[in-house]
Image (cartoon, helix red, strand yellow):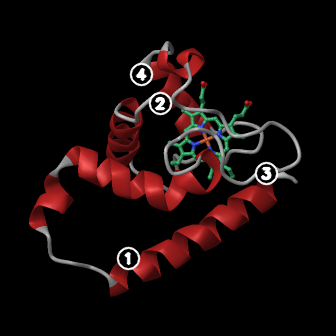
Amino acid sequence: MNRTFVTALVIILTMAGALLNQSSASSDAARKTDPLAKGKRLFTRHCAGCHGAEGKGDGYKLLGPDPANLTAPATRKKSDSALLATIHEGKPNMPSWKGLLSNHDIQNVLAYIRTLPH
Ligand code: HEC
């Protein structure tokens, strides 16, 4: 599974997510402004497919490294800047998000990951 394929897959999933989101666009102002709610929405749409709904790494398994369990001590111990860099740059089997999400969205998504139960 090469990175171009993974990136293409993610773009397709992102577009499908955007369509779904449009049709269910409730005008809930709080959901739009609360960073954690925004982070949760982004996580569910873009990350949960691989990392699992609760971040336990139980989503899709591709050939190669499995999605990280984002609630494991190994990840929780890492600094925000280290994890932000990983989300920006990607990993084997994980796309780079810097062209797809804004810095602000990436921070919201990490803030949400930090709240996942472990
Ligand atoms: C196509 C599958 C896939 C998607 C989608 C994906 N990831 Fe990942 N992610 C992975 C894999 C696989 C790893 C582990 C790679 C490794 O072990 O080298 C990983 C690792 C990480 C890590 C590093 C954890 C650590 O301990 O260093 C973070 C943080 C992370 N992902 C966040 C995210 C976020 C946030 C999103 C959504 C914006 C996302 N991932 C979407 C597959 C994915």
Q: Nearer the viewer, residue 33 or 44?
A: 44
Q: Nearer the viewer, mark 1 or mark 3?
A: 1
- Amino acid type, residue under disc 2 in the picture: Leu
| Residue 30 pos. (x, y %) | 11, 59
- Amino acid type, residue under disc 3 in the picture: Arg
Q: Dot 1 surroundings within 10 Å: few (below 14), some, or many (20 or more)? A: few
In the rendered image of this protein, does residue 65 appear above or below residue 94? above
In the rendered image of this protein, does residue 59 appear above or below residue 28? above
SS at mark 3 in the image: helix
| CA–CA distance in space, label 1 to label 3 | 26 Å
Residue at 19% across, 60% down? 31
| CA–CA distance in space, label 4 to label 2 | 6 Å
Q: Nearer the viewer, mark 1 or mark 2?
A: 1
Q: Nearer the viewer, mark 4 or mark 1?
A: 1
SS at mark 2 in the image: helix
| CA–CA distance in space, label 4 to label 3 | 24 Å
Q: Is mark 4 within 8 Å of ligand 1?
A: no
**Which residue position is annotated with label 1?**
21
**Which residue position is annotated with label 4?**
80
In the rendered image of this protein, does residue 62 appear above or below residue 27? above
Residue at 42% across, 36% down? 113
Residue at 64% across, 62% down? 10
